[in-house]
Amino acid sequence: LPCAGACYFAAKATNSVGVSSVFSNEAEKLMGPELVPPDSESIAVSWQESPSAQDLIISNTLPGNYEWSILAVGELVYIDRSYIFTSVPSELVGLNYLRTANNDKGSTGGVSFDVNKQVTVFVAYDVRFSTDSPPTIPAWLTLWTKIGMTVSSNDASFNIYSKDFPAGNISLGGNDDSGAYLHSMYSVMVSKL
C-alpha cells in the first residue's frame, strides 16, 4: 500500500466463538466506529478461517468460568495456572479449545457445551493417569479413541482422545472417576466435521 507521510492501519477480527481482537500500528490515530482514520485509503483483504472454525458456534459452556480460545504453542492451558502449551501437533493448531481450571483436576463433575454443527471433540488427558498402577482412565473416556498424538505444557504431557458428535449438547465426564489421583485437568478441543 503506497502512502506519503504517516501510514496507519487497523484490523478487527472476530472468531467463530465471538472473541474479537483489534490490531493497529497506532491506535490513538484511529477514529470512529469502523476504526478507520480520517483521509485513509482502503484496501481489500480477504482471508479464510481454518476449516474447523468456519460457522461453528459453541455456546452454553459449563462450568461457566471456563474460556474458549484458539489452540497454539504459547497459549495458557488453564484459567487458574500460568502453564502454557509448549508442543502442539500441527493437526490441532488453530482449533477452538476450552481453557479449563486445573483446580478441577479431582472433580468427578464434568464439562458441557452446545455446538451448532457436527464436530470432532478432542480431549487432552494427562499421560500420568495411564501410567498409574492400575491405570485410571475414567469410564467415559474409555469410549473414545486414543489417536496417538500428544500435546505438552511446561507442566505435563497429555494423550489425545477423539470422538465425533452431532450438533447439540456435548457432555464430558469428570477428570478422575476415582478421586484417587490428582494429575492435571484435561483440556478440550473442537473441530467441525
Image (cartoon, rainbow, N blue to C red):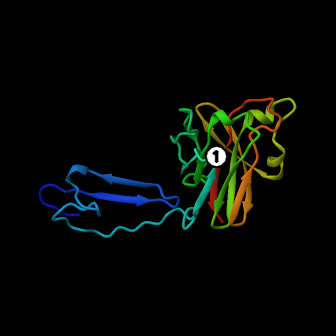
Front residue of this view, candidates 48 and 38: 38
**What is the secondary structure assignment of the residue under circle 1?**
loop
Query: Residue 38: x percent and y percent?
Result: 17, 63
- Residue 4 occupies which quadrant of the picture? bottom left
Residue 32 occupies quadrant: bottom left
What residue is at 61 percent from the left and 56 percent from the top? Answer: 60
Q: Amino acid at mark 1?
A: Pro
Horizontal side, residue 84 vs residue 11: left or right:
right
Give the image location of residue 106, x and y in percent: 73, 33
2 or 172: nearer the viewer: 172
The residue at the far left in this view is 5
Which residue is located at x 68 percent, y 41 percent? Answer: 186
Q: Is residue 26 visible?
A: no
Residue 190 in picture, x, y percent from top left: 63, 56
**Could one spot residue 49 in this view of the protein?**
yes
Image quarter where the N terminus lies is bottom left
- Outermost bottom residue: 44
Where residue 128 appears, as percent x and y from the top left, is 75, 32
- For the C terminus, the quadrant is bottom right
Give the answer, above or below, for where 133 lies relative to 30.
above
Q: How many marks?
A: 1
Q: Residue at x 87, y 32 (%)?
A: 134
Q: Is residue 136 left or right of residue 97?
A: right
Label 1 sits on residue: 63
Instruction: Using a 10 Å C-alpha cutoff, classify the residue at mark 1 as few (fewer than 14 neighbours), some (14 to 19) or many (20 or more).
Output: some
